[in-house]
Amino acid sequence: MSSVQAPEAILDPGLCLTLRPMRYPVFYDMFRDGIKNTWTVEEVDFQTDLTDLKQRLSPAEVHLIQRLVAFFATGDSIVSNNLVLNLYKHVNSPEARLYLSRQLFEEAVHVQFYLTLLDNYVTDPDERAAAFAAVENIPSISKKADFCMKWMDSIQELDHLTTRDHRRQFLLNLICFAACIEGLFFFAAFAYVYFLRSKGLLHGLAAGTNWVFRDESCHLEFAFEVVKVVRSQEPDLWDAELEREIVTMLHEAVDAETQFAEDLLSGGVAGLSVRDMRQYLGYVADQRLGRLGIAPAFHSKNPFSFMDLQDVQELTNFFERRVSAYQSAVQGEVGFHEDF
């Protein structure tokens, strides 16, 4: 097969360079929408956050934030590495690779945002270094990293997806990437941020998180669209065994994130419990399973009223609502539907 010829299926090996005729215009549209959502870290003002950290947060809330920042310090770097090393080379569509290039840029901005957050929130150099080493020295974060390595590193050495098993491994990687890491670990982190915002705390962090939230929601939509394309082209890859593996993966992700919640909330944060957090994780996990056409595994309802406006969004007509606002800083709240 010529390297520039359109492949039979999106996971066929090769390097298709042909953008006309466009085979997957949905990915090109997602790329263009991503550009509309451009933002910069310099737009985020952390000044009131510093006052909150010194004067308004309880010791338990400070511990929560320190653990959250430690996770942020490496979380998006794991995502970026997976994009480059495991996903880009296998999605053989120039339109999709355009989007992945845009996503990589967004992940770099997220890394910069969390670096700036860390520099502002943790001024002691030794404490800052410890935050960047969280994967090695904080057990609750190590557990999440181990989960990532278990489910995503299986295709690290695959240069070509030449067999059915290889393609199933790719699907599991992509679903873990979207449903568990971006779609569960990060959405749990957003819940902590918006809980504190509901108490009038850390508005700078919340403002930057609004942007990250939008980016991550678009990343989920792209990944699930790739899964949809693969399923339509190669339906034999998707069977009851694969669905059982996906459900097992989500259960393990919820368990890992619950252990993180036990750590974050170990000091006793008024208004937020591990039980409620686990219920929310089950609710989000069921949203992810539903997006994949899999029956709910947790049967949980959203326990957090403060997430009503910041919930898992469906992107239908998302950019049509305030297109011009996405060319620069967005002010105010954005409401999201639950059935993403």
Image: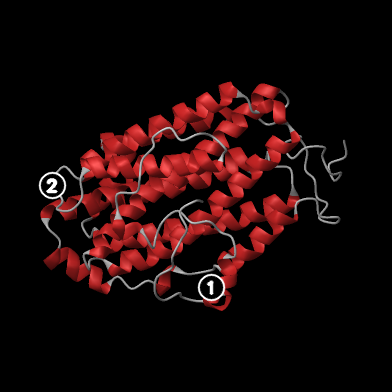
Q: Which residue is mark 2?
A: 268
In this rendering, the answer to whether 198 lies above or below 149 is below
Residue 225: % across, % down = 64, 47
Provide the secondary structure element on which disc 1 rests.
Answer: helix
Residue visible at 61% across and 41% down in the picture: 87
Amino acid type of the residue that numbered disc 1 sits on in the rendered structure: Tyr
Residue 161 visible within the image: no
Residue 18: % across, % down = 83, 52
Residue visible at 22% across and 66% down in the picture: 201
Q: Which residue is mark 1?
A: 326
Report which quarter residue 49 is drawn in. bottom left
Judging depth in this view, the residue of 298 and 254 nearest the camera is 298
Residue 142 visible within the image: yes
Q: Quadrant of the N terminus?
A: top right
Residue 157: % across, % down = 60, 28
Disc 2 residue crowd, few under 14, some 14–19, many 20+, Cα 10 Å: some
Residue 129 located left or right of residue 221: left
Point out which mark residue 244 bears: none
Amino acid type of the residue that numbered disc 2 sits on in the rendered structure: Gly
Contact check, label 1 and label 2, Cβ < 8 Å: no
Judging depth in this view, the residue of 200 and 208 nearest the camera is 200
Residue visible at 49% across and 45% down in the picture: 79
Report which quarter residue 84 is drawn in. top right
Residue 281: % across, % down = 35, 42
Judging depth in this view, the residue of 133 and 296 nearest the camera is 296
Mark 1 vs 2, N-terminal side:
2
